[in-house]
Image: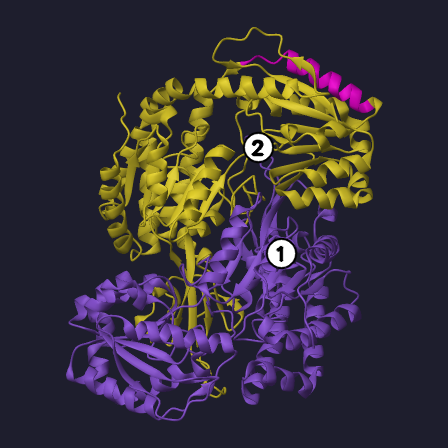
Chain colours: A purple, B yellow
């Protein structure tokens, strides 16, 4: 298949159609939106094995992973559809009139409404779950927004098949023309044209810091700035606390050798930094981790650009002063593969060298040897925003190191105790986000149904008669949703 | 009293203290935060008449208005304190573990945590309610953030008294040192230093477009961009629909003469634009509105800068092609006063001239005569984002003009039917915000307890043992807050 960049003229036409579609789609009921999303899920399954085969060829990802990822994508569509209908995300609030107040208090009712057309940039590392019919798309549809996908060039054929499934679902569900569009682009210009278009009202992105920050800057240079939800990766620090490390260094080494190399290290939540305090136990841990890494096979990475970047960034990290390679995989590596490796450096070296804070996307991790807990706390305080932070700690470790624990908590979106950061559960309590530079907006998640709220804003209706109000806010609560009436959360009618 | 700009060195010291205070304050319970806020409310009342006298002298606002505004400020502090404790804003979500899932699903629990020190810029037009102890400050304290106030130079003495009341409350409640600071500044540099400081994590502002946009741009140019919640005013369009206008033009004229001149037009929600369709009824309306304006006395404005800006902006608006003055107040005007006035222009003139879309802050409104409903719809589609939009309409008017109604809804944060936009009720259902350029972030309100969410972000705890979790997320729900447990909203314990 041959993919050429979508032209500026075509993008203008697409955005105009999306703008018209927005005005039709936002008026559809929550149930109609949810049905559309469920139909996309069905069509995605209907793509069958053919889709998996194409994705395998384009991404080098193994079949089982891709089947799992499609199932996850289907689950996202269905569970966000359920959340869309359930309606808690609308944050419906009703305060009834009080004519006896001076001045009289009017009837005011508030709910979420969609922002407008959303441009989603597909992620190379999640060809299904964070691409064409992925989490951002599902959230935008739930919120009432049309979606324009800029497909990732590394899996354009996969993306085209998924886009066709969405278009089929849109036709089946009588969705307005322009509710969805698929855009190709290898040049910067395509992305810029999409972000700068006046009808674009929000942007979703998962990828590199450079890419995400560029979209954010463009969006803020617009005459009308728009929100950009860019998830830009992270080094996901893991803090090994002394009591825990003393008692379980072997188990931790084995668990982390698996996490570092899972999916050839190509997850945003890959643990790229492990921090311990100099001790016999830390030496044993590093030794065991090194042994396990030596025995872990390299694997093919997503595309040649990623392999190249991994080699360069890892190479550069290893060139830094006081950084020492501990171990590399001893199994033969092919040209398209990423070679697992771990290195080590002192706490002081890490504190003094911002290069060591940068993500090396791939099966690599740096183990920091701090001279004491105070230095470990310093490291935590100097770390940039992260998607996740992990403590490997006993209860005593947590209770005795409050300053460290608070510092770690302050930099992350998800705080894991005695586990690994890889593996992002799709559920309402998930927060996949974090302080800058992990994302451009720490207040929103890109995984879980709360992600719908990224693409909506509140509007208050003042003094409207019941019959003219949206169903969500009518006295009789015809949709049966949770609402806060005169400060009480309830599913009851307004009396 | 003599106020000199706070120096860069002093600002650095203040921000360092605020950063330390943040780490202590965020650990305090919701009840401790709420008690602090309630104590501020008491201290604000304890300032007694002396505060009102100083504010009258500095702002030219009448005594009754200032007493009312202080009472509103006290109500904000108390009602946001109640919301803080009640805890729904924490959006607590719990998904319990499922070890039988493949891979096993860990226990995940999410809640809001504070962003960090918040810089608040006092508003000239609300010396109490949107200044030193105003809505932004109350929301930030509720969220768990220290506050640094940049006081408005036009009421520095008022602000100092209020700041002293906050400091007294902080001492009484044993708040950490640095929880609150008061900064003076007439130069741009003070504002810039505050916004650019690495320890500043969010900004609240109420004022002009130029001021708010500058803060927003600085915040996005930081190495770590931060959210800016700038409420930058609005022209608050009012659409007069035909059936309603035919039946009630006299009442509407009288109602709007009052709204346009209320508080000498110095409200963000002042109706600066009234749009009707050419007709006998519209002529009568304009005539009656003009008559009422002629009989409305000018009033003293907040400070000389505002009087000057009003004269200039009104003068410039009246110089625009096809804009005609309809009426001005015929009552003698003093140098520090704003002269009420209304003008008129055609729909075409408005569509072609962006100058007419700009806010004229003061007792001025422009009446647009559209040739038909289609042109009125065009006007609605071409309007920038607004805090409020109003329809003066019968049920038939609403039902028969869907395209217009949807276009108006899409540009505003609060949508009023048959009322006036002035008067912003402090309640949970209020949305005081709106699409850019009304604010820099349409997703958040600056009035009502939902404003607390501006200064918080979610964090997910994964695999934590019950005893180590924050009280908000513990199995037994010791705080008795609403939480979503395995997708069900409840106040129950986790089983």
Viewer-nearest residue: A247 or B210: B210
Mark identifier at residue B149: none
Indicate whether A473 appears above or below A392.
above
Q: CA distance from mark 1 to mark 2?
A: 33 Å
Q: Are marks 1 and 2 in contact (CB under 8 Å)?
A: no
- List x then y, in percent, for residue A198: 64, 48
In this view, the residue farthest toward the top is B332
Q: Which residue is mark 2?
A: B269
Q: Quadrant of the C terminus of chain B?
A: bottom left
> Residue at point 81% right, 36% down?
B373
Using the rendered image of the protein, determine whether residue A490 is visible from the camera's viewpoint. no
What is the crowding at mark 1: few (fewer than 14 residues within 10 Å), some, or many (at least 20)? many
In this view, A365 is above or below B192: below
Q: Observer-nearest residue: B302 or B198?
A: B198
Q: Chain of mark 1?
A: A
Residue at x 37%, y 43% (from the top left corner): B195
Q: In screen coordinates, is A206 left or right of B186?
A: right
Where residue A194 is drawn, which disc sits there? 1
Please tell me whether mark 1 sits on a helix, a strand or a loop. Answer: helix
Q: Position of residue B147 (x, y in %)?
A: 33, 43
Q: Which residues are magenta?
A: B281-298
Give the quarter of the image for residue B353: top right
- Count of marks, rendered view: 2
x%, y% of residue B65? 47, 24
Closer to the camera in the image, A382 or A23: A382
- Asked if the stretch drawn in magenta spans residue B294, the answer is yes
Q: Nearer the viewer, mark 1 or mark 2?
A: 1
Image point (50%, 54%), residue name: A216
Residue B48 sits inside the magenta stretch: no
Have a look at marks 1 and 2 and say if they share a chain.
Answer: no
């Amino acid at each position: 298949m041959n993919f050429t960049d979508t032209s500026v003229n075509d993008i203008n036409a697409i955005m105009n159609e999306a703008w018209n579609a927005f005005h039709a789609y936002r008026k559809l009921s929550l149930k109609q939106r949810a049905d559309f999303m469920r139909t996309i899920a069905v069509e995605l399954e209907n793509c069958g094995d053919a889709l998996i085969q194409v994705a395998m060829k384009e991404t080098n990802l193994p079949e089982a992973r891709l089947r799992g990822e499609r199932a996850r994508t289907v689950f996202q569509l269905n569970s966000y559809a359920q959340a869309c209908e359930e309606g808690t995300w609308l944050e419906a609030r009703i305060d009834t009139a009080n004519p006896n107040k001076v001045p009289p208090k009017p009837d005011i009712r508030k709910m979420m409404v969609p922002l407008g057309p959303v441009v989603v940039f597909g992620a190379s590392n999640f060809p299904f779950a964070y691409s064409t019919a992925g989490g951002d798309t599902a959230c935008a549809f739930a919120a009432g927004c049309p979606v324009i996908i800029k497909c990732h060039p590394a899996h354009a054929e996969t993306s085209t098949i998924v886009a066709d499934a969405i278009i089929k679902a849109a036709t089946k569900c009588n969705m307005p023309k322009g509710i969805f569009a698929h855009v190709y682009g290898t040049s910067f210009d395509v992305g810029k044209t999409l972000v700068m278009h006046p009808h674009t009202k929000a942007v979703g992105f998962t990828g590199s810091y450079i890419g995400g920050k560029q979209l954010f800057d463009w969006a803020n240079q617009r005459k009308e700035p728009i929100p950009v939800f860019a998830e830009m990766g992270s080094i996901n620090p893991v803090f090994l606390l002394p009591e825990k490390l003393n008692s379980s260094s072997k188990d931790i080494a084995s668990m982390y050798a698996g996490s570092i190399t899972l999916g050839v290290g190509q997850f945003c939540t890959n643990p790229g930094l492990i921090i311990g305090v100099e001790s016999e136990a830390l030496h044993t841990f590093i030794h065991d981790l090194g042994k396990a890494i030596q025995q872990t096979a390299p694997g093919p990475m997503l595309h040649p650009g990623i392999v190249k970047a991994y080699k360069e960034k890892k190479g550069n990290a290893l060139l830094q002063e006081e950084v020492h390679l501990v171990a590399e995989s001893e199994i033969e590596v092919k040209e398209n593969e990423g070679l697992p490796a771990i290195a080590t450096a002192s706490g002081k070296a890490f504190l003094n060298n911002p290069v060591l804070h940068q993500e090396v996307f791939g099966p690599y991790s740096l183990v920091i040897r701090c001279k004491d807990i105070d230095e470990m706390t310093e490291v935590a305080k100097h770390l940039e925003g992260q998607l996740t932070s992990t403590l490997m700690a006993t209860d005593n470790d947590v209770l005795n190191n409050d300053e460290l624990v608070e510092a770690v908590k302050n930099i992350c979106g998800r705080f894991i105790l005695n586990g690994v950061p890889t593996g992002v559960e799709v559920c309402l309590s998930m927060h996949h986000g974090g302080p800058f530079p992990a994302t451009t907006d720490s207040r929103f998640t890109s995984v879980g149904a709360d992600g719908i709220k990224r693409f909506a804003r509140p509007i208050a209706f003042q003094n409207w008669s019941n019959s003219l109000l949206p169903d969500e806010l009518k006295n009789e609560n015809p949709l049966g949703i949770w609402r806060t009436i005169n400060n009480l959360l309830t599913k009851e009618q307004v009396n």
